Amino acid sequence: MKDDYVKAILYAYPSLEAIGEAVGVSADNKAFLSYRDPHSAESVAEEILKEIVARRALSELSALVDTMLQHCTEEELFLFEYKYFRRKKILAERFSAFSLTCSERSYFRKQNRLLRKAADYFARNGWSQEKFLEETNGLFARVVSAIGEGREGAAHDLRRKRGLRYSSD
């Protein structure tokens, strides 16, 4: 599916800033230790530049998701949090009283519509799968590939116990 990268972004969202900081530290370390690198100065500089671009891209993506979430309804925020972000503390605090009353089939339809909405938002803001993989220097290539192969569970922790209750159809 062409929107696999959107799922990867959403799964990684809670950690995007931390990943970006780690990539920035990696770029700094490569620059500081470049005198030891046996490769040409040009190739080392290109690698450092790729990491700097990846750091900027991760920061931009984090801000983009933040902006997108500001335009979401409470139900959409819950659906994002429940399926993609999986921050237990926020689910327990902010959404403890939230009740999603729908059938299991409706739940999956809502999730599909929400993913489509997110994909459209990223596309309108200039993000495609190619740009995402290129600008993040391939950091998420394996995740996107796993999602595309139907191994979405490899991209996130599986829940031991279902936290939703569905109404009857």
Image (cartoon, grey):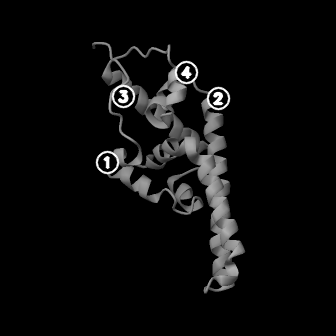
Q: Residue at x 59, y 60 (%)?
A: 135
Query: Which residue is tagged 4?
Result: 93
Q: Residue at x 70, y 66 (%)?
A: 28
Q: Residue at x 33, y 28 (%)?
A: 161
Q: Is residue 144 above or below residue 14?
A: below
Q: Amino acid at mark 2?
A: Gln
Report helix, strand or loop for mark 2.
Answer: helix
Report helix, strand or loop for mark 4.
Answer: helix
Identify the image quadrant of residue 35. Answer: bottom right
Left or right, residue 143 beside residue 64: left
Q: Earlier in the sequence, mark 2 or mark 3?
A: 2
Disc 3 or disc 4, which is closer to the eye?
4
Left or right, residue 67 beside residue 160: right
Q: Is residue 131 above or below residue 122?
A: below
Q: Earlier in the sequence, mark 4 or mark 1?
A: 4
Query: Which residue is tagged 3?
Result: 108
Residue 17: x and y in percent read 63, 47
As measured in the structure, the alpha-carbon distance from the residue carrying label 4 to the one carrying label 2 is: 18 Å
Q: Earlier in the sequence, mark 1 or mark 2?
A: 2
Report helix, strand or loop for mark 3.
Answer: helix
**Residue nearest the viewer, comparing 151 with 95:** 95
Query: Which residue is tagged 2?
Result: 70
Say which mark, if any, is on residue 150: 1
Q: Is residue 67 above or below residue 20?
A: above
As measured in the structure, the alpha-carbon distance from the residue carrying label 1 to the one carrying label 3 is: 16 Å
Q: Amino acid at mark 3?
A: Phe
